[in-house]
Amino acid sequence: MNIIFATEIWGKTPYVDGMTSFFEDITSSITVVDPYDGTDPAFASEEDAYARYVAECGHDNYAQKVIEAVQQTTEPTCLIGFSAGAGAVWSAACADNVGAVVGAICFYGSPIRNMMNYMPKVPVDLVFSDNEKSFEVEPVARSLQDLPLAQCYITPFAHGFMNPLSANFHKDACQFWLQWIKDQIAPQGAAQS
């Protein structure tokens, strides 16, 4: 099983390396896709990260980066995305050619609210925060839950709970959901062996 990670607007930070290392025992390879081509801009604030993301990348470009990573792999692949990366993963999972992708997991993907007419081609787990500044989570999750191949979860944690750089980081929730991801992926990888 291959994993493609799509990061938040913070880019490929050291925490991403730590997160991906958690999955080394269940995957043959891990590819990290981020808005800044592998650099860590070391942003001073979330506002700085968002401004640079919008100026230098944006959703369409980020989605294209994930789709290009998908096209580079021939072995069964799981996509995992966070925030802006979740929006890019959703786009890739709904693209006409998903290649070897067998599933996707999207965490607090607020951009997905603008892509609710997309139809996933592979199973997608959508893990939302219970409260978002820019939209009402429950009606969005309810609509997405009705799509074939979509499964929604609403957590009691705030947007960014998986990211130590976020003011909303929640260590216990992060550990729980990392293990949850591993539990979802490990059986798929074993089935492919």
Image (cartoon, grey):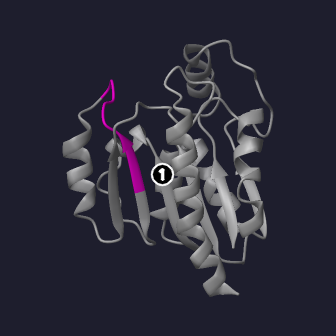
Picture layout, residue 152 above or below residue 157: below
**Residue 10 spot, x, y in % from top left:** 65, 29
Q: Is residue 60 left or right of residue 151?
A: right
Give the camera-side residue of 192 and 111: 192
Q: Quadrant of the C terminus?
A: bottom right
Q: Is residue 79 magenta?
A: no
Picture layout, residue 119 above or below residue 53: below
- Residue that appears at 78% across and 29% down: 40
Q: Is residue 106 left or right of residue 135?
A: right
Q: Quadrant of the N terminus?
A: bottom right
- Residue that appears at 69% across and 46% down: 19
**Residue 28 spot, x, y in % from top left:** 78, 70
Q: Is residue 164 left or right of residue 153?
A: right
Mark 1 = which residue? 106
Amino acid, disc 1: Cys
Mark 1 residue element: strand
- Residue that appears at 56% across and 24% down: 166
Range of residues picked out in magenta = 126-134
Q: Is residue 132 magenta?
A: yes
